[in-house]
Image: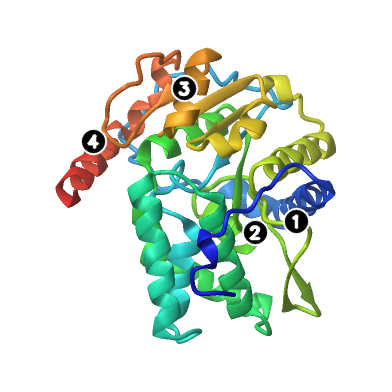
Amino acid sequence: MAALGWLTPRRRSATARSVLAGEAAAEAARKTSAEDESALLTKTPDQDPDQTPEEPAFPVAGDDRAAAFFDLDNTVMQGAAIFHFGRGLYKRKFFERRELTRFAWQQAWFRLAGVEDPEHMQDARDSALSIVKGHRVSELMSIGEEIYDEYMADRIWPGTRALAQAHLDAGQRVWLVTAAPVETATIIARRLGLTGALGTVAESVDGVYTGRLVGEPLHGPAKAEAVRALAAAEGLDLERCAAYSDSHNDIPMLSLVGHPYAINPDTKLRKHARALDWRLRDYRTGRKAAKVGIPAAAGVGALAGGTAAALALHRRRR
């Protein structure tokens, strides 16, 4: 790949490969969820036992045909998971400094732009696939646990995590839906006490990565296909489900559900959400969007203090 290959524009739309990627992600997510179900039932995320959240008007408690779908990058977590994962692999000498520089530049672009650019993300995934080719899936899963602790754990938005917890407290399933590798997404979902994750599926043979994808990256239309496939398999009513994202690239996914939320939205998504009367929440500055429409309890008082502290730290870093 050329050094400046990420500058070359490429068009993408819903295709048979999007459907394949979505179905593969749904199958992988259901398999992982089934394997982890007993552990997830007994494990809850870290929470202050002295704080009790108010009962939210939404989500509806006990509605087992409803679920929530959360984008990951810049919605649940600050920055992009694939870049943090790359940093961790570099630390373990999976690749050389010039490739780390490339990852660093892509991460800087992501943070400055504040949106998930599909061309940059595609280039990052191509780099990651070449790096993991020939490695065992189990090896990368083990390393991924360490990388989460090193680079990701302190980048979780407390406000978004609170929204996810509100769905869990209502007895609903909560899934991450991300272009990040499904293995990485599954680790993050497990650490947050979520049901599971839909992510990009890399091909493996006998437990070894081949360096190819199943279908295409789980981005844009492919995310919608994954949610649709999972909902059909799990007997969910999408009109009763919720979806959360920061990016206009996820409008296809948000449009599938009856309760779409724009979280830390980019300019295009904010405009689209306001036009359609979607609910908005912005945790980057602490301000509430003008068109809120989110129940007060959605902030979940149990994490209000953590949200304020995280925002104060973020301002100091800026």
Crowd tier of the residue under label 4, counting other residues whose Cα lies within 10 Å: few below 14, some 14–19, many 20 or above: some
Counting from the top left corner in percent of width and height, residue 201 is at 71, 61
Distance (Cα) linking label 2 and label 1? 8 Å
Labels 2 & 1 near each other (Cβ < 8 A): yes
Distance (Cα) linking label 1 and label 3? 34 Å
In primary-sequence order, the first of circles 2 and 3 is: 2
Quick one: 47 or 307, which is closer to the camera? 307
Residue type at tag 3: Lys
| Placement of 118 over or under 272, stated as above or below | below
What residue appears at the point 44 percent right and 86 percent down from the top-left corner?
96
Q: In the rendered image, which residue does mark 4 sit on?
A: 308
In primary-sequence order, the first of circles 1 and 3 is: 1
Residue type at tag 2: Val
Q: Secondary structure at mark 2?
A: helix
Crowd tier of the residue under label 1, counting other residues whose Cα lies within 10 Å: few below 14, some 14–19, many 20 or above: many
In primary-sequence order, the first of circles 1 and 4 is: 1
Distance (Cα) linking label 3 and label 4? 26 Å
Q: Residue furthest front?
A: 8
Q: In the rendered image, which residue does mark 2 sit on?
A: 182
Please say whether residue 190 is visible from this viewpoint: no
Label 2 or label 3, whichever lies nearer to me, is: 3
Distance (Cα) linking label 4 and label 2? 31 Å
Is residue 252 rendered to the left or right of residue 180?
right
In primary-sequence order, the first of circles 2 and 1 is: 1
Q: In the rendered image, which residue does mark 1 sit on?
A: 28
Q: In the rendered image, which residue does mark 3 sit on?
A: 271
Residue type at tag 4: Ala
Labels 3 & 4 near each other (Cβ < 8 A): no
What residue appears at the point 67 percent right and 24 percent down from the top-left corner?
257
Counting from the top left corner in percent of width and height, residue 35 is at 72, 58
Counting from the top left corner in percent of width and height, residue 32 is at 71, 56
